[in-house]
Image (spheres, rainbow, N blue to C red):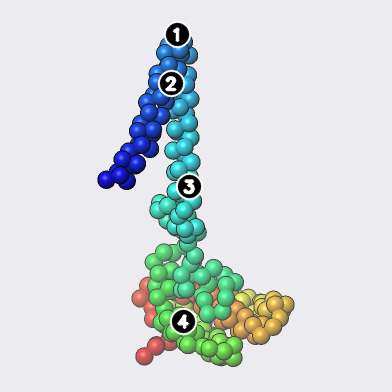
Amino acid sequence: MAPMKAMNKPIKLIALAAAAAVALGLAACSGGASSSVAGSDAPSQNGQSAASSEAGKSESASSQEQSPGDSSGTGSESSAAGSQAPSIDEPAEGEQPGQLIDIETGNAAFDQKFKNNPIDQQYLKEMQNAISNVDMVTVSEKYTSLWKTEIEQAYKKLQNLAADDKEAYAEEQAQWEKDTPAALEKIYESAGSVGGSLAAVNAASQTMDYYRTRAAQIYAELYTYDPEFTYEFSAG
């Protein structure tokens, strides 16, 4: 039992110290009681400001603990929506090989029909399976040839249906054919300036885009006469 008595002494000393502190605190409060109401309010306001500041620091620290990629919901989603990159079948012009430039003619119905053409769908499948640069060049050259065929067949259909505008369309096609060598030369020069192993890939891809774009122009004209036109190519 002796140890128990020994332990009681520190406890009593602590209690006495606490009582003394309380007494000193009361005396200080009593001495400041004569301060004006405005003066007594100031420390309270300062205390509230300090508390508010501490709360702000706490919130700031909490937000900093979040991972950099986890910026809060709507802001992040809104930013992503605003900068949404195009999907693979609607890339911007000049993007990497294997993607397709977006065709927009101002006719939404035609644009949707062309977007779903079987040639593009098959091209994307084959390009996804192209492993080497040589493979990608081969695929692009194959579809360049297919788009040339589409141009020829669509133009024939247009000439048969557009009796009144046949001459105008003939002049348009003749001008395009005249401009083609210079356009292709520009493509080769642009692709060659990049250099490296991708030069041939870029040249082949952009050449295909050139013929595909012309085919789209003719089909857009044909659509005004025959909205149910069909493509020459069939994936089956």
> Which amino acid type is marked by label 3?
Ala
Q: Residues within 10 Å of mark 2 (few under 14, many from 20)?
A: few
The quarter of the displayed image where residue 171 is located: bottom right
Q: Which mark is residue 129?
A: none
- Residue placed under numbered mark 3 in the picture: 61
Dot placed on the residue nearer the N-terminal end, 1 or 2? 2
Q: Which mark is residue 34?
A: 1
Mark 2–mark 3 distance (CA, rounded to whole Å): 37 Å
The quarter of the displayed image where residue 71 is located: bottom left
Mark 3–mark 4 distance (CA, rounded to whole Å): 48 Å
Mark 2–mark 4 distance (CA, rounded to whole Å): 85 Å
55 or 7: nearer the viewer: 7
Q: Does residue 211 appear to the left or right of 119 in the view shown? A: right
Mark 1–mark 4 distance (CA, rounded to whole Å): 86 Å
138 or 13: nearer the viewer: 13
Q: Residues within 10 Å of mark 3 (few under 14, many from 20)?
A: few
Hey, which residue is sitting farthest left in the picture? Answer: 1
**Do tag 1 and tag 4 residues touch (Cβ < 8 Å)?**
no
Instruction: Locate residue 145, reporting x and y percent.
Output: 54, 88
Kindly identify the residue that appears in the image at 63 percent across and 75 percent down. 175
